[in-house]
Amino acid sequence: MKIAVCDDNQIDRDVIKDLLRKYMSEKHIPEVITEYENGMNLIYDIADGGCYDIVFLDIYMEEIHGMDIARKLRSTGYTGKIVFLTSTAEFAVDSYEVEAVGYLLKPHDYSKLCSVLDRIIGKTSSEQFYFSFRNTIHSVPFNEIMYVESNNNICIIHRSDRKEFTVHKKLSEIEQQLNDSRFLRCHQSFLVNMNYIAEADKQFVLTTGDIVLIRQRSQKQIKKTYHEFVSARTL
């Protein structure tokens, strides 16, 4: 997730960055945070094609008022989320004009930041797997992940569109992130989305023809789990 923090106070920027990193770490969401001490630089970067999912914007800055920055961002076509940071609720009503999604009062409070971020990304992130690939942050909806294949500390995400991504994580870590009943750890090296299984015998054959191995010593239990999943899905 790409985030911009615009505040002319270095201490305030550092505090909000630390809180954002804490939240994203807890949610297993990779983040890239870019800081700005000047609102015009933020405007220029976005006008030049810069892309941010969320902009955290201080209202009281010396060179240009935060509300004016927000108006200019919207006029450039920025459609991402804007969250205002301020020491007073004076402009809370005005924030609706620029479709701000949050208004956080200083000093920064982690629980209030979490509340705002949960509204913005909480529901979608629970159904999205976030990861870094070639220095870019990607997200894949759970229902587009066919299976995950492991090779030591490197995993390959196999998507339904046949694209593949390499993730430098252990399979157990990914399994924890994909904490959803549709995913079955069927082998030391495989985690499969059961919605894509077409045939279950000594191994799983997916709807695409891909083969996913089944751990032999647990074959009976693994196939039982799969059949229970299919039965529940058809109810």
Image (cartoon, rainbow, N blue to C red):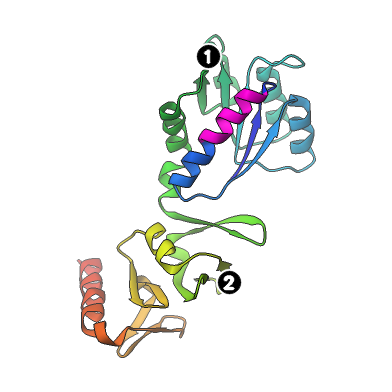
Question: Residue 224 vs residue 190: left or right?
Answer: left
- Residue 93 - label: 1
> x and y percent of residue 45 in the render?
77, 37
Above or below 202: residue 164: above
- Determine whether 31 is above or below 233 in the image: above
Identify the residue shown where x is 65% and y is 18%: 67
Quarter occupied by residue 222: bottom left
Residue at left offset 51%, top offset 22%: 103
- The residue indicated by pointer 2 is 163
In the rendered image, the vertical position of residue 87 relative to residue 187, given as above or below: above
- Is 121 left or right of 230, judged from the image as shown? right
Mark 2 vs mark 1, CA separation in Å = 45 Å
Is residue 141 rendered magenta in the image? no
Q: Secondary structure at mark 2?
A: loop
Let me know if residue 20 appears in the view.
yes
- Please give the range of residues in magenta: 10-19
Where, by quadrant of the figure, is residue 219 drawn? bottom left
